[in-house]
Image (cartoon, rainbow, N blue to C red):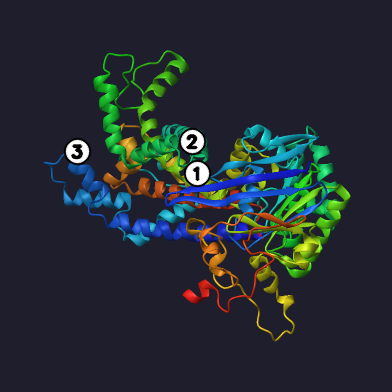
Amino acid sequence: MIHHLVRRLGLGVVTLLLISFLVYGLIRSIPGTPLTVVVSQTDPSRRLNPADLERMKAAYGLDKPWYQAYFIWLTNVAQGDLGRSISRKAPVTELISKRVGPTLALSTGSLLLTWLLSIPLGIYAAARSGRGDERAVSLVLYMLYSVPTFVAALALQVTFSLWAEGTPWELPLFGMTSGGPHAGTAAWLADVGRHAILPLICQTYVSLAWYTRFINTNLQEVLRQDYIRTARAKGAGTIRVMVHHAFRNTLIPLVTLLGLSLPALLGGSVIIEQIFSWPGMGRLFFESLRERDYPTIMGLTLLFSLLTLAGQLLADLLYAWVDPRVSME
Amino acid sequence: MPLLEIRNLVTAFHTPAGRVPAVDGVSLSIERGTTLGLVGESGCGKSVTAMSVLGLVASPGRIEAGQILLDRDGRSIDLVGLPERQLRTIRGGRIGMIFQEPMTSLNPVFTVGNQVAEAVRLHQKVSRQAARARALELLRLVRIADPERRLDEYPHQLSGGMRQRVVIAMALACEPDLLIADEPTTALDVTIQAQVLELLADLRQRLGMAILLITHDLGVVAETCDEVAVMYAGRIVERAAAAALFARPLHPYTIGLLAARPEHRRAAADPLAAIPGMVPQPRDFPAGCRFHPRCPFVREPRCTAELPSLRELEPGHLVRCHYAGDLGDPATVPAEARAE
């Protein structure tokens, strides 16, 4: 068990090094640097003095070749320093820690909602397989699954912000708060809650359709197994067969999914956060890419890779926990 | 009153290709404490008959006609059309069932003790500890070595023979009046087969239960059964006491089955006898006697046109054949073989 863990961790470190090296090389090859992008945005008419540009390059370490710069970055990371953002004039860790909260709020909310709805829906669909109501539910879910997020987001915005304007159904179009001072924490929470509704729906509906389908198909496969017949012959009722005997077996593929969803939990959704101007990690990633903000991009890449690897390890451990046939030895 | 009496059971599957009558007018009865062997080739409707008794016929199949009468404390109840709630008390309570595939019949994610105890707790209001103690007792009853340790093991840690013992322990949890054993030894090694059969015979005596033994193995029937019913293409073709059936089989199908047993050969070098042709699929059962295309004694036009009834040729010996007892000489090649 411990041997297995050590091996996995060792492999994880090697993977991280490879990913960060490749990503660093790639982002340094994108045309434009943090300096050219910033200058073109602040003052497109002005041409920077070449001497000034060289000075600034040296100050940010951009005068060195990228592989050299990578090792400097790596040495700093090893000492716990992710560097300072070039475009935002703040430490990367500070930028990330500000954005984690909003993303977590949205993603954990969405994940909880997805699981709470998809597990009963999936079990229900499997139990009623082939009947009219199950087909209707499956059809609706399949249609939802086919709708792109940005289309759904626009439809929601049109419905709840434009059509519902002035009615109690009106919901804010974007942002996390309406701004301005809030009368206490409760008022602030209520304001954030109202802003979160539309992005939450957007982030949930696709995964809801996907998870329900996943649970349904897996359950149907399990229900064909001989041990389900044995359970029924023992006198177990439909609900006990579905929930106790069958669902427990579909947990095995489900935990893999849980592990894989860990990076998305902190990574956030670039599209949804962008559309709803939600100040989260996905938006930070998108913006830092646009600004060629190398330290921030690298900091986020490192975090996402770490989470991906941790998620896989978590899935492995959960796997052994839910399936007695799997052993770590 | 017999413990279980099946009267004219019809169980059919409604598929897109049409109605498939897997069981087509089967009548059987089992007395308390006896063993009835239900014999036939794969696909003849044996297992569907058993699943009908438990009310577990899978969709799109359903019982269309007939009665399944169970004697419960002197009162006869019809299992056909019984509400699901009451059927559940019968399943695992009055009727236990064991299956062909011990390797897959146990849930892989629960311990053996958990699964046996569940069978107890589904029918009796007892504490967890009491159910576990009963599970241990049951594992001892089915003679599993080191039962204390096995209680906390998972099915994958057990051999096939042991798993079948666990399934038997589960089926016996509430001391049922009837045990349905659907090919209980088919998937096991020969030595383990004998042990399991011996265990079943022993348990029957100790618990006084009846057994419906479904098998295609006539050797197993000869060793364990009091009565035998031979099934072919969804119908009973012969029913008799085991001794009478083996001594004097009357239906051409039974005669063929007995002749096809490997031990029936006079010398090891003799070729195995076989019944030519295949069991017909329920959707294209032939007209007349369903066995006629494979029957060496077939006589036109009666066999090909008229369905024979199940008649009592000798006391307690029923047969579904127009010419049983007077078969005459076999044709050298039966119709189906001729057609090939």
Give the structural element (helix, strand or loop) at label 1.
helix
Q: Amino acid at mark 2?
A: Leu
Crowding around mark 3 (Cα neighbors within 10 Å: few <14, some 14 to 19, many 20+) is few
Query: Would residue A190 be found to the left or right of residue A252 on screen?
Result: left
- The label number, if any, that marks residue A121 in the structure image: 2
Give the structural element (helix, strand or loop) at label 2.
helix
Q: Confirm or deny contact between disc 2 and disc 3 (CB under 8 A).
A: no
In the rendering, at what x and y percent does residue B304 appear? 52, 63
Residue under pointer 3: A42
In the rendering, at what x and y percent does residue B156 appear? 69, 58
Q: Residue furthest right?
A: B206
* In this rendering, the label closer to the viewer, 2 or 3: 2
**Alpha-carbon span between mark 1 and mark 3:** 51 Å
In the rendering, at what x and y percent does residue A247 appear? 58, 43
Q: Amino acid at mark 1?
A: Ile
Q: Amino acid at mark 3?
A: Thr
